[in-house]
Image (cartoon, grey):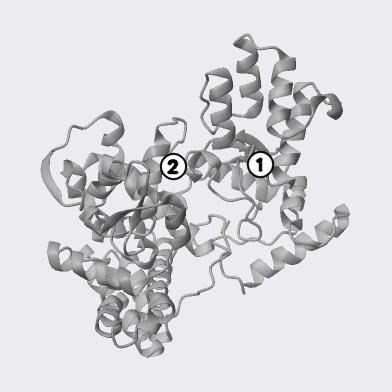
Amino acid sequence: MLLYATIVDTMASKNWHPNFIKYTEFIAAHPNYKGLPIERGLDGSLNWVVANKTSTIRQGRIKWCENKARELGFKIEPGVYAKVMRKIHPTGEKVCQVCGKKMSIFYHYPTVHLINKLEKKFGIRFPNTTHISEIWDELLDSGNKESDLTEFFLGCAGVDKTLSGKTDKKSVIETLEDISRNSGKAILSPGAMSNFPDRFDGFHTYNLCCRSTQDTGRHADNMKSYTRDRRAYEYWSDGNIHAANMFMGSQFFKGTSADHIGPISLGFVHDPRYLQPMDKSDNSTKRDRLTFSDIEKILEVESRTKIYPISWYSAIVWEYVKQNYKLHPEKIPSTYRDMLKQSMVNFMYILSQIIHQTQNGNKYLIDCFLKNNAKYFNYSYEFNARGDIVKQSPRHFTDRSNNEMERYFRIALNSVDDYNAKENRNMSNSLNSAEKALLNDICKSINAGESKDTVERKIRKLVSEEQNSIIESYS
């Protein structure tokens, strides 16, 4: 219980790290941002993220930035927002919302491609959060000549050092940064991705350190964990999520990619029984598509294992799809897929409102939903090729695994804002006035301190009603 109390405490203030809170106050008060619209919430904290594309705050930010661009002599064209916000940033470093680490807003960190080249050439593997300047200095300290480093890095960028005229450390780094940012070459990555006007300062709240791991990101071995589990945490997936993570890292997927038969971005579970090997390029192409054969496979697995294939918040829509997919197979890749996507969008909107419109919403959501998956983390598993668990044994906990539940809760809660703020989202929530009234009532219940069971019952009722509304609107 002590660990749980600590987890809840660290999620206060919109899940922001104290260093990030200080950073937001510093930026909001800086004269470089005078006139850029921002408001404060009821708790006094800055409303840093504005996801609603039609909000007056967001539109005001766009107008302000375009005026600033003209003032700076930038042409109004795609990419101008990023140029402006980089130019006016007072320090060139942004604090990470999750871990509080400062990172450069410029392309100063090695990509996987460069990391592999460095290891092959110099025998040293650097974490992807190591600044290029630090890499240069460490390679010099290891006995390499500056001329050799210049040749290596400019060679990676496709620049002949004899023609560039730029051979010192500062000039080489500037060349690498410029080429990485403007030519699309995978040499260096930014410490913080551009995200204006969603974020007040124009940069994503997560830095590179937590962008891929949703953890401190200081250890290279964290990357393997991220590739297995983070998306399932983000989508609040049901299923034996710990077993699925272990299965994805097993010998059965050596040389291939682990594919969710039912995409977890559409609400399907993260469970070993619903994973299959797939060529990496094919898996990348599949994305969140749903096909007739996928549904047939899902139903076969469900019949064989008795493991329900979809997370609770999309179960009603899924049952509708099951009843109708054979009658209307032409609707699977569009209508039925969109219905499941809409269900996910609505659920994430509901979570967002609970988190931001209540004092203790995080705690209620952990108690009502996330803690249900805690039991899976207590065991280690062995599998057959189909993902069936053939052996289960009590887990040996290490310092890293002891923090796994805290990490799971943190990722799930922090991902809600990220999901709702993505610019490429082409669906907004579809809650009607009655459903929004239910949502407001849920928030009032949480603020009034009503019981966990009462709140959970109300949330489940709302999620059921909005799913039925989806079915009605698409029918």
Circle nearer the N terminus (1, 2): 1
Q: Is residue 25 left or right of residue 438?
A: right
Question: In the image, residue 373 lies at what x, y percent?
Answer: 22, 53
| Kind of residue at badge 1 | Ile
Residue 5 appears anywhere in the view: no
Q: Amino acid at mark 2?
A: Thr
**Residue situated in front as seen by the camera: 348 or 380:** 380
The residue located at (44%, 30%) in the rendering is 219
**Residue at (53%, 62%) from the top-left corner?**
421
Q: Residue at x 32, y 43 (%)?
A: 406
Q: Is residue 78 left or right of residue 44?
A: right
Secondary structure under tag 2 reads loop
Point out the frontmost of discs 1 and 2. 2
**In the image, residue 236 lies at what x, y percent?**
33, 59
Residue 348 seen in the current view: yes
Nearest the camera: 346 or 330? 330
Quadrant of res 252? top left
Query: Residue tagged by mark 1?
Result: 105
Residue position for label 2: 213
- CA separation, marks 1 and 2? 18 Å
Q: Quadrant of residue 366?
A: bottom left
